Amino acid sequence: MSEYSKTNGHISVCSANYLRISKLLNASEKRSLTLRNKIKETIYSAQIDTQKLSNHTWICHLVFSNLNHKLLNSLQFVLNIYHDVELCEVASFNGHAPNKYPFSHENFPKSADEKLQQNRFLTEVLDMILTSGFYEK
């Protein structure tokens, strides 16, 4: 895959995620939002907290939890939201940031498309929140 198509794909995913997160934040008009849902016998929770850095840049913390599962019950995203270009990008997922540069010696080696994977995973989480009847707690 050429770098051009990788970049276009990444921008498309981040642009679509901006629309998704905007739907959630604009619906509440709050800086902090707690959502919950029960799907079959599983209770899910989503906590969204935003911090305005400037008129065009926000940081968003999204914690998505499966309250019934003890082992791996929480997914934690830190998002950079850029309002001027309408992009929402994952800065870190569960405390791990994607590679900025391809270093050969890392404590925790990551795949070459880690950044794309994290942003696509955010897409799935936001889609689940938007389409599964989550309600404000």
Image (cartoon, grey):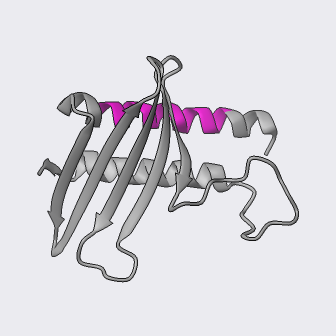
Confirm whether the magenta stretch covers residue 52.
no
User: What secondary structure prevails in the magenta region?
Assistant: helix
Residue 72 in the image: above or below residue 127: below
Where residue 33 appears, as percent x and y from the top left, is 22, 43
Q: Which residues are magenta?
A: 8-23
| Residue beneath the point at 83% across and 53% down | 102
Q: Nearer the viewer, residue 27 or 95?
A: 95
Residue 36 in the image: above or below residue 78: below
49 to the left or right of 107: left
Where residue 34 appears, as percent x and y from the top left, is 20, 49
Q: Spot the residue most to the right.
A: 104
Q: Nearer the viewer, residue 23 or 106?
A: 106
Residue 65 in the image: above or below residue 28: below
Q: Nearer the viewer, residue 49 or 117?
A: 49
Where residue 55 appears, as percent x and y from the top left, is 44, 17
| Residue beneath the point at 38% across and 82% down | 71
Q: Nearer the viewer, residue 21 or 76?
A: 76
62 to the left or right of 47: right
Tally of marks: 0
| Residue beneath the point at 39% across and 30% down | 19
Residue 26 in the image: above or below residue 133: above
| Residue beneath the point at 18% across and 33% down | 28
Q: Spot the residue most to the bottom.
A: 71
Please identify the quarter of the rendering in which residue 118 is found: bottom right
